[in-house]
Every structure is written in C-alpha cells, then in structure tokens.
C-alpha cells in the first residue's frame, strides 16, 4: 500500500461520531440488526480502489457496501446466504438505479385512501400471508390490512415490486411491536429484533395501522434518488464458504463478517419468513457465528473454522496485489475473538493497515452492561 493511501486511512476518524443512516436515503428503507454504517465502506472504497473496478462483499447483509460502491462509480458484487438479506439488498439496489414513478406511487396512495376499507382475507398468489402463526403476532385488523397491501403489491411491475417488498417487510416488523411497553426505568421500550428472533410474541395483540405505516415508508422513498447510477451490481445468494465466483475476479473486498454469538439473521427476520412461507431451518443451520449457538462449548472454535473457509474463498476470488478490508467486532461473551479472526486472515494475506479500533455509537442489547463496544477495521493484501 502506498504511503499516501496509508496517510489517508490514518486521517479518518473511524468512530464517525456524528454519522448514522440518513433519513430518506436508500439505506433507510429497511431495518437491519447490524451496525455497519455506510461511512465505513465508503471511506475504504475511495482509498483502496479506482473508478470502474469491482468491489465485492461476501457478507452482503442489507447491501451497504454495494450501495456505496455504486455511488462511487465502482461495479459491485454482493452475496449473502440469507434470503431476507438478498431480497432487501435487491430492493435497495433497484431503488438506487430506478426511482419509483410518481404516478405509480400516487395510484397506490389512492388505493389506500380509505383505511377502514383496506381489509382483505385473501392470501398471496404463492400463499403469502397464509401462516397461522401470523395470528400470534398481529391483530385481525392489522393482518387484514397487511393482506390488502400485499394484493396491491402483486399488481405492480417486477421492478416496483422489489422496492415495495422491502417497504412491506419493514411494516411487518413495525406492526409486531408491543405498544406502550416500558423499561425498568419507566422509558418506552424500543421494539427490538431480539424479541422476534427469540420468538417472544406480544402478550396482547394491539392494532397497528399498517396502511399508515406503509404509506409513510412509501413517501419517504419517493425522493430517495437524486440521479442515475451508471455502474451495475450483481446480487448472489451463496454461502461465503463456497462461492461461485471465478478465481481472481474482484479488485477489492470490503465486508463486515458476522460476529461470534451476536445475531441470528434468519430468526431476526422471522416475520418475513412466516409471511413468505420460506423455511428457516436450512438457512438458520448455515449461519456463521449465529447467536443461538452462543452457549455451545465449541462456539468460538466452530466460528473461527467457518471463517477460515471464508478467508480461503476471499483469497481465491481476489486479484493479486488487491486488498481485503474487514470490519469485525466481538461480544463480551467471547473476548479476543476479533483478534483471533484477524490473525487467521493474516495467515494468507498480510496486514498492511490496522487493526484500528473504533467505538460504536449504538450498543447491541447484549452488550449494554459491558464496557465501551469496540470494532476493528483492518486491511489485508493478497500477494
């Protein structure tokens, strides 16, 4: 790495203390359990690649790296094993390149004008909204509204459906909250993915206005795009331990791998899987470092073993002389896991910058009683 590039990386305040997800940006159209802010991949991509090169994220999540790569004039390849992540990423990338037509949006608003009439018992053409367990999460009135919205989504073009799918999924999550629940200090409790992941169902089914929430989300994205994006992205559903990409086919890898024992990505999106009728078992079993495995004696060893397979695949698809940048952290339950992972990566690709610690502005629920939460940013080079 050149001295200039090193200096540019050193000058960045990796804490990004005032950063977050800008309201109305393409990043904001769907909630996500991780804390991977867009400023991090944007900075790494600018320093470590050139316009027109291919940036790859093997743990694509909600598409944060891919979006920033496209905005910076790079080509993006993004992959993830989890169906929910793939669908959310495709929705965001679709919105980035193809703004929603105002006439289409206005027609949707018109069809949702009279909320008391927006009820349906019909399920989707592929059985969406059929699962009986949905009745354990939503009141009958809310479920009727959700089914009504889904029928409207089915009438749209495939391109529009991708975006509306993500907005709808966001509403599914919001409508499953327990209204008015409070913390032990008396503050209103924030709806959290952990309850959904752990299948903690609402004690009382409360009406949530799904029509109002969906319309609010739709209005927020109508002005999301400021101009066309000239480069393209490829989204792949695949396991990072066994990638389909060709050898030496990408110019830069920027990714935030899963942390050991912190998040269950499949179960966090339980409501979407229920709605769509997707089976969760296989994808859940394939998750790396999943939270539900955190009490296993060999949880760390299993995680590191899986990540070594991912490392080897990253090394294979990365061009010689190119860089791999990772953002990795750890939970208080498994201290030093990040250091062990970084050491493993350095066995095949030497570290050329970092690891640089950064402090998160938001803590995961599992770490709120711990000290300051820390992540590490690190750059490796394939020789």
Image (spheres, helix red, strand yellow):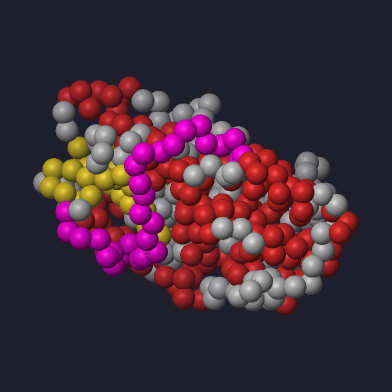
Q: Is residue 247 above or below residue 44?
A: below
Asked whether 236 falls inside the magenta stretch, the response is: yes
In this view, the residue in front, 240 or 223, is: 223
- What range is drawn magenta here? 221-248
Could you tell me if residue 94 is visible in this image? Answer: yes
Q: Main secondary structure of the magenta part?
A: loop
Residue that extends furthest to the right in the rendered view of this protein: 116
Image coordinates of residue 320 in percent, x first then y, are 13, 47
- Give the residue at x 18% y 43%: 322
Q: Picture quarter containing residue 142?
A: bottom right
Image coordinates of residue 353 in percent, x first then y, are 24, 35
Q: Picture quarter containing residue 15?
A: top left
In this view, the residue in front, 13 or 114, is: 114
In this view, the residue in front, 357 or 379, is: 379
Q: Picture quarter containing residue 139?
A: bottom right
Give the left or right position of residue 229, taking residue 320 as reference. right
In this view, the residue in front, 229 or 214, is: 229
Asked whether 353 falls inside the magenta stretch, the response is: no
Image coordinates of residue 29 in percent, x first then y, are 58, 45
Q: Is residue 3 above or below residue 38?
A: above
Give the left or right position of residue 305, taking residue 375 as reference. left
- Give the residue at x 58% y 62%: 269
Q: Is residue 111 above or below residue 350?
A: below
Q: Is residue 31 above or below residue 222?
A: below
Give the left or right position of residue 256, taking residue 353 as reference. right
Image coordinates of residue 370 in percent, x first then y, are 54, 44
- Give the residue at x 27% y 65%: 244
- Give the residue at x 24% y 34%: 50
Could you tell me if residue 315 is visible in this image? Answer: no
């Amino acid at each position: 790495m050149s001295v200039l590039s090193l200096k540019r990386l050193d000058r960045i305040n990796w804490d990004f203390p005032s950063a977050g997800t800008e309201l109305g940006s393409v990043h904001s159209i769907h909630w996500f359990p991780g804390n991977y802010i867009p400023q991090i991949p944007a900075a790494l991509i600018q320093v470590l690649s050139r316009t027109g090169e291919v940036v790859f994220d093997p743990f694509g999540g909600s598409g944060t790296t891919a979006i920033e790569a496209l905005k910076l004039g790079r080509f993006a390849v993004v992959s993830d094993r989890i169906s929910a992540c793939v669908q959310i990423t495709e929705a965001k990338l679709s919105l980035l390149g193809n703004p929603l037509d105002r006439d289409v949006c206005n027609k949707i608003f018109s069809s949702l004008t009279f909320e008391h009439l927006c009820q349906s018992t019909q399920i989707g053409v592929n059985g969406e909204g059929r699962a009986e367990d949905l009745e354990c999460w939503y009141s009958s009135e809310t479920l009727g509204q959700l089914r009504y919205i889904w029928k409207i989504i089915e009438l749209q073009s495939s391109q529009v459906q991708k975006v509306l799918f993500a907005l709808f999924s966001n509403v599914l999550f919001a409508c499953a909250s327990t209204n008015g629940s409070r913390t032990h200090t008396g503050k209103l409790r924030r709806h959290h993915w952990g309850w959904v992941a752990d299948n903690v169902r609402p004690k009382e089914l409360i009406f949530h206005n799904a029509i109002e929430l969906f319309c609010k989300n739709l209005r927020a994205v109508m002005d999301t795009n400021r101009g066309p994006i000239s480069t393209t992205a490829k989204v792949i559903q695949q396991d990072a331990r066994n990638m389909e990409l060709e050898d030496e086919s990408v110019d830069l890898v920027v990714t935030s791998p899963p942390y050991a024992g912190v998040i269950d990505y499949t179960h966090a999106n339980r409501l979407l899987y229920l709605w769509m009728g997707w089976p969760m078992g296989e994808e859940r079993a394939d998750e790396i470092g999943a939270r539900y495995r955190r009490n296993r004696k060999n949880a760390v060893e299993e995680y590191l073993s899986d990540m070594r397979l991912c490392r080897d695949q990253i090394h294979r698809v990365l061009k010689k002389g190119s860089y791999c940048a990772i953002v990795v952290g750890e939970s208080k339950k498994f201290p030093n896991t990040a250091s062990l992972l970084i050491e493993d990566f350095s066995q095949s690709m030497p570290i050329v910058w970092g690891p640089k610690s950064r402090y998160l502005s938001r803590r995961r629920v599992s770490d709120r009683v711990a000290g300051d939460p820390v992540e590490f940013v690190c750059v490796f080079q394939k020789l």
